Amino acid sequence: MNEVRYAGFWVRFLASFLDTLFLALPVGIVIYFLSDGNWFDFSQYQQNIAYAMSGNAQKALTNQPQTSLKWELLFEVSVLLVTILFWKRWRGATPGKKFVHVKIVDAKTLKDIDNKQAITRSLGYIASTLILMLGFIMVAFRDDKRGLHDLLAGTVVIYDS
């Protein structure tokens, strides 16, 4: 039997970055257009960038654009569903994870995750983010390379051999 190789922080970071480009960004573009631009005030983002580039970071931070909770929730739920669909279709992988040859599996059996684990892991990203991203950073320091969301869901990310 092959030795389990846990995926570390940087390979998982790269996979997440790629998933942002190939999953979240396209979903975001579709939702932005479905909302007729009512999801968020894009012009305010542009204005904030101009403030920040001119050295007026304080003004950029105080003038945050308004967002529509309805469209934001639709975006978040859509990304969650698309991610879970990829996990189910590609046996624990998203496009980013496929690209770097890693997958999510059950921590005890190393078999495919179930729906409960997929949902728990996805919602666990919130907990991993809340305290200065420590739930993600802990991946770099654990021998089994598990983040808080992995611990909550009973999952681990391994190299796909």
Image: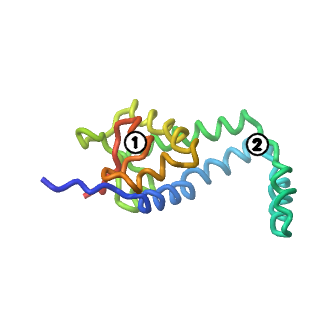
Q: Residue at x 80, y 55 (%)?
A: 45
Q: Position of residue 158 (x, y in %)?
A: 31, 53
Question: Of helix, strand and loop, which one carries label 1?
Answer: helix
- Crowd tier of the residue under label 1, counting other residues whose Cα lies within 10 Å: few below 14, some 14–19, many 20 or above: many
> Do the numbered discs 1 and 2 sit on residues whose CB atoms are within 8 Å?
no
Image height check: is 117 above or below 2?
above
Q: Which residue corresponds to mark 1?
A: 150
Q: Which residue corresponds to mark 2?
A: 39
Q: Position of residue 161 (x, y in %)?
A: 24, 58
- Relative to 48, 86 lies left or right: left
Q: Position of residue 69 (x, y in %)?
A: 73, 35
Q: Residue at x 51, y 59 (%)?
A: 18
Tell which residue pokes out farthest to the bottom in this image. 54
Can residue 2 be seen from the camera position used here? Answer: yes
Q: Residue at x 31, y 50 (%)?
A: 144
Question: Of helix, strand and loop, which one carries label 2?
Answer: loop
Q: Nearer the viewer, residue 56 or 106?
A: 56
- Image quadrant assignment for residue 95: bottom left
Image height check: is 77 above or below 28?
above
- Crowd tier of the residue under label 2, counting other residues whose Cα lies within 10 Å: few below 14, some 14–19, many 20 or above: many
- Image quadrant assignment for residue 53: bottom right
Q: Position of residue 128 (x, y in %)?
A: 51, 43
- Relative to 65, 105 lies left or right: left
Can residue 91 be seen from the camera position used here? Answer: no
User: How many numbered badges does the structure rendering display?
Assistant: 2
Amino acid tagged 1: Asp
Q: Nearer the viewer, residue 126 or 135?
A: 135
As drawn, the label of residue 50 is none
